[in-house]
Image (cartoon, grey):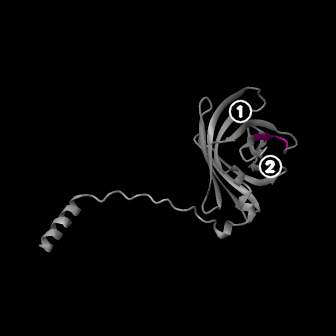
């Protein structure tokens, strides 16, 4: 009798798929020993979910501006060794992009790589400056005009900050605001 019962149970079990696995919520990864220094926490003010108000210039030297909104999701990743950015703006100025930032122990500076849905790729280097944080892009030349771009984080509080995309054609003696973004922490 026991053998017949075992055959019936085995036959029923093999004819029905196993129930789906229940996801288990894991504790956050511990910070890797290699990334435990305070320099790796210098950009942590940016981590979180944000709503953003974007004010952007049409092109250098032109006082034509466009306003839009968007979202920004910033996380620490790779055991605290990197900051991952996921940016999205809605129409009329819709675009999206992502970046990874990390502290480069050899340069003693932060580095960021940005890519976007328009085929853009930009590399940056920098770190804390004055009362904020700045990352500088590689110098470029377009139509005979040499310039450099930088990102500047300022007015940093727990629930808000200001981010600017600035352009200089004279090695930062002067600069022009190209994009201003006001961040508000999402609740």
- Residue 17: % across, % down: 27, 58
> To which quarter of the image does residue 57 belong?
top right
Magenta stretch prevailing secondary structure:
strand
Q: Is residue 176 left or right of residue 53?
A: right
- Residue 86: % across, % down: 60, 46
Q: Quadrant of the N terminus?
A: bottom left
Please tell me which of labels 1 and 2 falls first in the chain. 1
- Residue 166: % across, % down: 77, 40
- The structure residue drawn at horizontal position 78% and vertical position 42%, both measured from the top left corner, is 147
Crowd tier of the residue under label 1, counting other residues whose Cα lies within 10 Å: few below 14, some 14–19, many 20 or above: many
Q: Quadrant of the C terminus?
A: top right
| Callout 1 touching callout 2 (CB < 8 Å) | no
Magenta range: 165-170
Residue lying at the far right of the rendered structure: 173
- The structure residue drawn at horizontal position 78% and vertical position 30%, both measured from the top left corner, is 61
Residue lying at the far top of the rendered structure: 64
* Residue at mark 2: 132
* Residue at mark 1: 56
Q: CA distance from mark 1 to mark 2?
A: 21 Å
- The structure residue drawn at horizontal position 61% and vertical position 63%, both measured from the top left corner, is 79
Q: Is residue 69 above or below residue 111?
A: above
> To which quarter of the image does residue 176 belong?
top right
Q: Is residue 33 left or right of residue 61?
A: left
**Residue 168 on the magenta segment:** yes
Q: Which mark is residue 145?
A: none
């Amino acid at each position: 009798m026991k053998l017949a019962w075992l055959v019936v149970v085995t036959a029923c079990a093999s004819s029905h798929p196993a129930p789906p696995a229940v996801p288990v919520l894991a504790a956050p990864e511990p910070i890797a020993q290699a990334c435990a220094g305070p320099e790796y926490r210098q950009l942590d003010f940016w981590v979180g979910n944000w709503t953003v108000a974007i004010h952007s210039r049409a092109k250098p030297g032109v006082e034509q501006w466009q306003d839009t909104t968007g979202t920004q999701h910033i996380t620490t990743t790779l055991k605290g060794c990197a900051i991952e950015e996921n940016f999205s703006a809605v129409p009329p100025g819709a675009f999206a992009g992502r970046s990874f930032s990390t502290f480069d122990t050899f340069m003693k500076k932060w580095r960021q790589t940005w890519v976007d849905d328009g085929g853009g790729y930009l590399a940056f280097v920098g770190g804390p400056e004055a009362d904020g944080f700045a990352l500088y892009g590689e110098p470029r030349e377009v139509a005979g005009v040499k310039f450099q771009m930088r990102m500047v984080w300022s007015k940093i509080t727990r629930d808000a900050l200001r981010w600017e995309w600035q352009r200089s054609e004279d090695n930062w003696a002067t600069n022009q605001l190209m994009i201003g973004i006001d961040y508000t922490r999402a609740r």
